[in-house]
Amino acid sequence: MKEIFSYGCIPYKRESFGVLVLMVEHRNGPHWGFPKGKQEEDEEGKVTALRELKEETDLEGTIVDSEPIEIVYEYDEGDERVRKTVRYYLCDVGSGSEAQIQIEEITDFQWLGLDEIIDKATYSSNKEVARKVREHFSR
């Protein structure tokens, strides 16, 4: 079985009315989730996450929690079974930040409230990530 590791950010900003989380619609699928991508050789996970955030949304931010939210899932790629591990980091992009999507990989984006992100996520694994994000901000 082939193993793939990806890293991503869950971009958020605090506005006067509450926390907003950025979700993106990935062209591959298409599906709604969070910015992520494959780790390059000799690249640390957090560096990958921040690089992918910048590439896909033109946002920069600060990772605020060193413990990532991890999901693992499997899928078929041709004749080969793939196990993919994705580690997401919460990333504060600052109040007033606006995204510019990378049209080669992303077709749309939305800033959503914490009560909206679970319903917006397409796959069950991303819904679980969204639940954990909501729990984090409910503490």
Image (cartoon, rainbow, N blue to C red):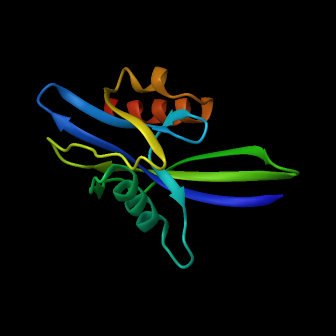
User: In the image, is 30 to the left or to the right of 119?
Assistant: right
User: In the image, is 30 to the left or to the right of 35?
Assistant: right
**Front in this rendered view, residue 90 or 121:** 121
Q: Is residue 68 visible?
A: no
User: In the image, is 93 to the left or to the right of 1?
Assistant: left
Q: Residue furthest front?
A: 104
Residue 36 in the image, given as x and y percentages of width and height? 49, 52
**Front in this rendered view, residue 109 or 94:** 109
Q: Tell me which residue sits at (44%, 47%) in the image.
A: 35
Q: Residue furthest left?
A: 16
Q: Is residue 43 visible?
A: yes
Residue 67 in the image, given as x and y percentages of width and height? 45, 54
Residue 119 in the image, given as x and y percentages of width and height? 47, 20
Quadrant occupied by the C terminus: top left
Q: Residue furthest right?
A: 79
Give the number of callouts. Answer: 0
Q: Tell me which residue sits at (59%, 42%) in the image.
A: 28
Quadrant occupied by the N terminus: bottom right
Q: Tell me which residue sits at (39%, 63%) in the image.
A: 51
- Examine the rendered structure and indicate whether residue 43 appears above or below residue 100: below
Quarter of the view holding residue 11? top left
- Examine the rendered structure and indicate whether residue 67 appears above or below residue 103: below
- Examine the rendered structure and indicate whether residue 41 appears above or below residue 64: below
User: In the image, is 49 to the left or to the right of 138?
Assistant: right
Residue 82 in the image, given as x and y percentages of width and height? 77, 52
